[in-house]
Amino acid sequence: MVDELPFEKRSARREATLRKLFKALSQFATGDAGRIAVEHRQEALRQSCFLGLRAGTPSEQYAACRVLEVTAVILGGDQDEYYESVEKTLRRVVMATVSKATPVRVAALRALSMTNLICASDQAEAEGLLDLCEEVAAKEYRGHAVPATLRAAALDCWALLGTTIPDHHLAGKDDFMIGRGLAILELLQECLDTACVELRSAAGECLALIHEARLNLGIADDEGENTTERRYKKGGWEGSQWEELMDEVKQRISELSVESGYRLSKKVKKEQKATFRDYVSTIVEDEAPDEVVNFRGGTITLSTWKEIVQLNFIRHCLQGGFQIQLLTNATLQEIFRADGQLLNAISQMTQLEKRLVMSKGSEASKAADKELTKQRRARNNVKNYFLTADGDDI
């Protein structure tokens, strides 16, 4: 099927073949056997996709980008040569302001970002790609207005790549540098006021990621005259040059979490409220996110925006193949800190065994509930610290 693609002259046939390839790769190229098979045929896959990008219709070009993206996930880490082989072509598609359709540019940017996350090991490559995302996320790029959907995709890709850099590089500032997230806060604030729901949601996700990094940085304050006594507090925006801007952002995100009106459909309104409630809990209330991924082999609980951003991006890439790839792909298991042997062992359990081990009444669930209660109590104590700071309890 792959070998025949370069000789097929009809674009519709090539597109159909690429779509079949995407399904085959995402759902059936599993484990080491699937990875080895793709490694042996990656040159033919790559050349077929390049042909589609060069001479195909927009729908074929879109399918080619999706195949390149899923191939990166199957190949896994330590595949710098694959990233280098597709980087120039995909970047050229993203930068084509006139000759390429917007969905094709969106797919190319997402494929480029996913390939960088999975395959590339050079941090400088990620930095250069972050620069491209910031340029594309602006109102204008290379003298042309940027469509809102492409701006939203650029912010999604920025958030994905932002998960790979340290918190200080993302939300800190010193005498030598300013965090990448801090540099685009004004852009993100402007995106919250646009009419495009996708763009608003992408901006909110970036803000949640930046705010989480800011909280993680923390502040070490001196206590009294004895400078050896130091108290660690969560980081924040108070006293910084971005305090006023973030206050406005918090107000706007709170409004979006309860927005109503006739200009949005009932479905879109419901999705926006649910999405922005998650952003409010982090950006306004300083709460850690909590998302549970249910799949055939059990569940995985994610408690940081870095993990959730990666999850959403990878799930969008793999579509119906997400579940089986999570069970068999060593790179994905490493990203989400999952034990592949345990996951596959759980998938072979009987229904009775699953109830005893994985139900809400199991010992593991009770222990997790106690831990969450303990963390919640600690966060409340931090919030109310100022009430007892002078030693007088209320």
Image: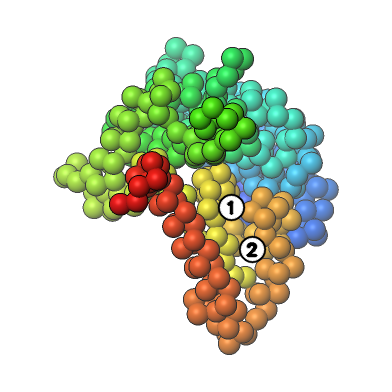
Tell me which residue sits at (27%, 49%) in the image.
269
Q: Nearer the viewer, residue 380 or 40?
A: 380
Q: Which mark is residue 324?
A: 2
Rendering coords of residue 312 (x, y %) = 52, 49
Dot 1, crowdedness within 10 Å: few (<14), some or many (≥20)?
many
Element at label 2: helix
* Residue 233 x/y as whole percent: 50, 39
Residue positioned 28% across, 41% down in the render = 254
Furthest residue toward top: 143
Residue sitting at the far bottom: 352
Q: Nearer the viewer, residue 68 or 393?
A: 393
Q: Tell whether 373 sits left or right of 313.
A: left
Any part of residue 15 in sight: no
Residue at screen point 59% across, 29% down: 227
Q: Is the residue marked by circle 2 packed among few (<14), some (14-19), or many (20+) residues within 10 Å?
A: some
- Nearest the camera: 330 or 18? 330
Residue drawn at x 49%, y 76% is: 360
Residue type at mark 2 is Ile
User: Residue 60's image quarter?
Assistant: top right
Residue 107 in picture, x, y percent from top left: 54, 37
Residue designated by label 1: 318
Mark 2 or mark 1, which has the lower sequence index? 1
The three-letter code of the residue at mark 1 reads Leu
In the image: residue 316, left or right of residue 336: left
Instruction: Name the colouring of the figure.
Output: rainbow
131 w.r.t. 384: above or below: above
Q: Nearer the viewer, residue 8 or 240?
A: 240
Q: Quadrant of residue 340?
A: bottom right
Distance between the Cα atoms at labels 2 and 1? 10 Å
SS class, disc 1 = helix
